[in-house]
Amino acid sequence: MNKKANQYDIILTDDGSETLFSHLYNESCHSASGAKAETKLHYIEGCRIEQAVKNKSELAILEVGFGTGIGFDETCIALGGFDIPITFVSFEIDRQLIDRYQNKNQETFIFYENKATLLKGNIELIIYIGDARLNIKSVMHKFDAIYQDAFSPKKNADLWTTEWFRDLKQLANEECIMSTYSASSSIRKSMVAAGWKLSMGDQFGNKKSSTRAKITGTTESGITQQLERSPAPEITDKNYKDYQEGKLS
């Protein structure tokens, strides 16, 4: 079921929740198998949000790609029983998506320079609008969880480079978990090169696996062996355009 929404198509996914298909990136924001289900599995459960909040006096979460706002919404639902201060920081290149969320949910954002903010109970939402590679330099928080939910490496490769994952690592608390839907050998090589330690994530939809990462511990041996065998290139700031255009083997 599709309905035109400016440069996006609204798509009803298999679990009854909506996602958007972006004409700019030629890709949907979520799996057609279920936008809410995917978000819960990879980010709420993948980053162990409910476990992380139990022994903390405050919590900070970083999301790469605000999109439809479902990551924020599902996080609010998961943390609804906790009254500690929670900061949810997100990046979004398209102001139109923030306006869409505001209108759909009858919320009122405060806009200032390149940021939109919203207070929902004890949860503060801060969205940096524009190029995430530039805006990440302005982020001052340290995060307990990172939702790496950008469009896929083949469509949005500059948010999957080694340098990007180094920037994320600088913002991670010692116990931080970074989770993503992707199991690409290239992005895993980029994560490892940036100093992340990887583990296998859950299957969802037509994807056989996903990826979880921490800054402590060791990478699972199965992933290490997979990467040693794989000819896929590490994605870097020098080659990401060629990778995106399919020029790298």
Image: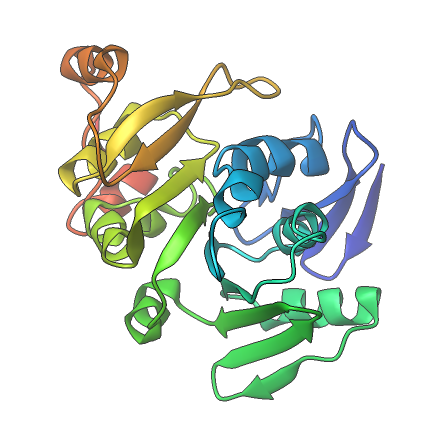
Residue 101 position, x and y percent, is 73, 65
Identify whether 135 is placed above or below 45.
below
Figure colour scheme: rainbow
* Image position of 83 (left or right of 164): right
Task: State the residue in front, 87 or 152.
Answer: 87
Q: Position of residue 232 (x, y in %)?
A: 22, 23
Q: Is residue 200 visible?
A: yes
Left or right, residue 98 beside residue 166: right
Q: Nearer the viewer, residue 194 or 230?
A: 194
Residue 202, percent across and down?
50, 20
Which residue shows up at 51% across the image and 37% down it? Answer: 48
Q: Is residue 8 left or right of residue 116?
A: right
* Quadrant in which the C terminus is drawn: top left
Q: Say which residue appears at 43% left-offset and 48% top-offset.
A: 145
Can see residue 245?
Answer: no
Q: Residue furthest bottom?
A: 112
Q: Quadrant of the N terminus?
A: top right
Seen in the picture, residue 229 relative to 28 is either above or below; the reply is above
> How many callouts does the rendering have?
0
Q: Give 63 or 120, whichever is nearer the viewer.
A: 120
Task: Name the side, left or right, on which 90 lies relative to 199.
Answer: right
Residue at x-position 84% and y-position 34%: 16
Q: Quadrant of residue 191?
A: top left
Query: As rendered, which of 110 and 87 lies closer to the eye?
Result: 87
Q: Position of residue 126 (x, y in %)?
A: 53, 72
